[in-house]
Image: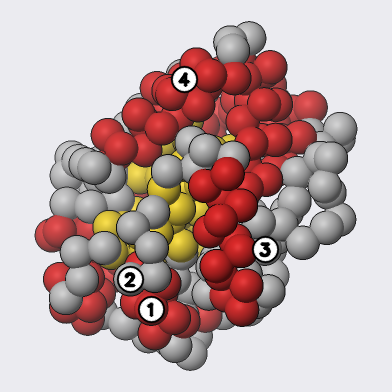
């Protein structure tokens, strides 16, 4: 089992990292991908990937931070090339729901991340909220260049998923899929092919049922796996094997 998206650099996870790793291993997690969101957060990411062999990391700037943390593709490439435990680019993308950063700053940052991903041939971890059309417009500019796309915490429409599938995208299910009001999302994941699905916690946020409202952590990914297995009408063991294989195939591990 793999938690494909967590924020171990955020407290209370970082300050309790030994316990977090222990509980992750107890439920059968073999890899954790801790996600970078700011230039400053990468300092903690570098510490974490050397903490335990199950932890891997990424480098990237969250769209909320695009206004203040401006990076070029060359900067991204340089940082990633210095550490073989950094296996992805992001969290990048577009968020026009909160608009913490100007739209053009987000788009510019997103494209720099895409350029770095293409040069390094490693996956992009994508955050997309209230920006389906704009996200697709940008992806379509590069559709002939074999982008490696991972849609993190996917909550988009089935039509959005269909368009992304045509680009070879992968989709990560978070604890949101366990919420009783997420019926449309559950239908979308019925539509998405099994060989394109991963699981995540996005911890310390978005704890799944039965722990909704509590502080999330990677070990809770088992509840998302259970729900997704139910949605796809397969056994938990089969779901875990497939999503683990999908992660390893995408990240060439």
Secondary element at image label 4? helix
Earlier-in-chain disc, 3 versus 2: 2
Query: Residue 188: which disc?
Result: none
Badge 2 local density, few (<14 within 10 Å), some, or many (20+)? some
Residue position marked by numbered label 1 in the rendering: 47
Q: Nearer the viewer, mark 3 or mark 2?
A: 2
Q: Earlier in the sequence, mark 2 or mark 4?
A: 2
**Residue 233 visible to the viewer:** yes
How far apart are the two marked residues, 4 and 1, measured between alpha carbons?
A: 34 Å
- Residue 50, which numbered label? 2
Nearer mark to the viewer, of 3 and 1: 1
Chain-order first, disc 3 or disc 1? 1
Residues tagged 4 and 1 counted as in contact (Cβ below 8 A): no
Q: Position of residue 1 (x, y in %)?
A: 48, 36
How far across and how far down the image is residue 210, in percent? 84, 40
Q: Residue at x 70, y 35 (%)?
A: 223
- Whichever of callouts 4 and 1 sits on the residue coming sooner in the sequence is 1
Residue 204 image label: 3
Left or right: residue 110 compared with residue 156: left
The residue lying at 50 percent from left, 26 percent from top is 240
Q: Circle 4 is placed at which residue position?
A: 194
Answer with the quarter of the image where residue 45 lies.
bottom left
């Amino acid at each position: 089992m793999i938690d494909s998206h967590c924020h171990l650099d955020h407290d209370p996870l970082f300050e309790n990292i030994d316990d977090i790793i222990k509980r992750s291993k107890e439920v059968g997690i073999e890899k954790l991908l801790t996600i970078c969101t700011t230039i400053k957060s990468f300092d903690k990411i570098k510490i974490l990937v050397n903490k335990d062999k199950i932890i891997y990391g990424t480098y990237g700037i969250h769209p909320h931070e695009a206004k203040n943390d401006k990076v070029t593709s060359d900067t991204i490439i340089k940082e990633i090339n210095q550490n073989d435990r950094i296996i992805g680019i992001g969290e990048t993308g577009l968020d026009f729901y909160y608009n913490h950063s100007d739209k053009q700053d987000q788009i510019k940052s997103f494209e720099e991340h895409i350029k770095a991903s293409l040069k390094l041939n490693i996956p992009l971890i994508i955050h997309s909220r209230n920006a389906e059309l704009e996200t697709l417009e940008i992806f379509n500019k590069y559709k002939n260049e074999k982008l490696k796309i991972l849609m993190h915490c996917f909550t988009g429409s089935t039509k959005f998923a269909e368009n992304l599938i045509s680009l070879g995208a992968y989709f990560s299910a978070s604890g949101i899929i366990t919420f009783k009001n997420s019926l449309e999302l559950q239908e979308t994941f019925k539509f998405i092919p099994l060989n394109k699905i991963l699981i995540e916690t996005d911890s310390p946020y978005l704890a799944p049922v039965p722990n909704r409202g509590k502080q999330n952590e990677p070990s809770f990914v088992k509840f998302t796996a259970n729900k997704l297995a139910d949605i796809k009408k397969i056994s938990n063991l089969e779901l875990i094997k497939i999503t683990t294989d999908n992660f390893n195939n995408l990240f060439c591990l």
